Amino acid sequence: MVKKMSVKQEKQLFGTNGIRGIIGRDMTPELAHRMGLAVGTMRPGIIAVGRDTRTSGPSLVAAVTSGLLATGCTVVDCGIVPIPALQFSIRDLYDAGIMITASHNPPEYNGIKVIDGDGTEMGDEEAIRLEYMIFHLDYNPVSWQMMGTIRQDTGVADRYVKAIVESFPQAIGSGIKVAIDAGSGAAYQTTARILKELGSEVLTLNTRPDGTFPARNPEPDKGNLMPLAELVTQVQASFGVAHDGDADRAVFVDDKGEYVEENQEFALIEDVICGRNEKPGIIVTPVSTSRLADHVASRHHCSVYYTPVGSIYVARTMRSLLQEGKTVIFGGEGNGGLIYPQHQFCRDGGMTAAMMLFLVSSRKKPVSELLLDLPSSSMIKKKVHTPETKRLLSFILDQYRHEKNITIDGIRIERDDSWALIRPSGTEPFVRVYVEAFHNKTALSFWEEIQSVIIKVIPDCVIT
Ligand code: MG
């Protein structure tokens, strides 16, 4: 069963994942300072500030802190922490927070994420208000008597590790060997500790924090996890786990050193969570996620609820469905960013690593065998480069209006044996096309059909 949420609003500075940019070009201390002033004006109170390991982190933290202090906030400096760890502490202890991170982007990037007092990323309406304040220099600086102060919190990682470990039975990792690639990012503080405290034997790579990311790009993908795959096979680990720069995503290699495609990862974790839950519930995910999610949900009499692309929409939809009295058991994106509502409403790399350990320990099967329980599927991903993204989408909407579809973010066309998503990029001149079917031939012919529609309306587009 498939449900969906309403259309998202337009933002200018904020993208799908906060504000991001290249240092010195579009991400500057001036912008961070203004963001500090704006957040301090909107959320006067105790504001936690954290960062990932990037070289530009201290400069941007100082700038954002300056703005917060000038608006009378108490700034809690949390240092280098995984973003889910910061979100966990904000939910319990602080009025709001700011994370300086560019997540998976290369080292020359950095960014700003604003976290609300409930630990979720700030919603669109308020992000648009912050943008207005920044564009119009509309702040409330305080007098000298009201200036804010700074204090430290060195317990953010500890609280997060403890909460995750306590979510599982004791020593579930006993007898299980795991390899970790922290990618020189914020995960160096937490994932090895979580898995060790759950009883497993842990081997690590790239656990020295380094904002130049010397071993691999912060984006963990099939192409740069060969050292992790080699370590897994060499020491005969049950699986390997790798994180992005701020450790909200976790991706895996199986016991044979093979990369686990992220939609398969989603389905594996979804399966263990649905099985762990006493009654059926809702799984929330964006329209870009594989139909494997729906397949696994049906196995457990659960349903999938679709949102626009972006973890913020997933997290906030999960919360609002729960507030309506619905049973929401799991959510996240098909890119290794998974959300566990019983823990907190954000993508959570440490929890995902622990959940994979729980899966292996409870099923007593290696990850490569667990993957065999999932149907095989074939996904085609393309980019159609054209400045006329709006015209292309409206033509496609018209062409496929008679088929079953979801139009909350681009158009997702649902057929019995396949589906496709045609979705314009929010910031760049191209349209993404995803086509998936359980058989390669079906996916290919559906893609060829869509391609011919695209070429009919924009003959000079470039498809990559
Ligand atoms: Mg991230």
Image (spheres, grey):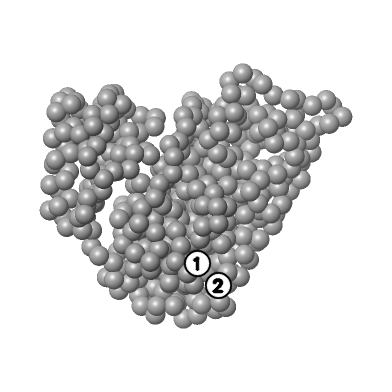
The residue type indicated by label 1 comes to Ala
Camera-side residue of 222 and 382:
382
- For the N terminus, the image quarter is bottom left
10 Å crowding of disc 1: few (<14), some (14-19), many (20+) = many
Nearer to me, 456 or 98: 456
> Vertically, is 143 above or below 291?
above
In this rendering, the answer to whether 213 lies above or below 349 is above
Q: Residues within 10 Å of mark 2 (few under 14, many from 20)?
A: few
Frontmost residue, 141 versus 238: 141
Instruction: Report the residue marked by disc 2.
Output: 168
Residue 272 lies, with reference to residue 32, above or below; the image says: below
Is residue 439 something that shows in the picture?
yes
Residue sitting at the far top: 136
Q: Is tag 1's residue or tag 2's residue first in the polypeptide sequence?
A: 2
What amino acid type is highlighted by mark number 2?
A: Phe
Determine whether, in the image, residue 233 is placed left or right of residue 38: left
* Residue 60, x across and y down, in percent: 60, 35
Side of 220 where 209 appears, left or right: right
Of marks 1 and 2, the one in the foreground: 2
Q: Quadrant of the C terminus?
A: top left
Q: Measuring from the top left, give residue 100's x and y in whole percent.
A: 57, 40
Q: Which residue is rendered at x = 52% and y = 52% of the image?
A: 321
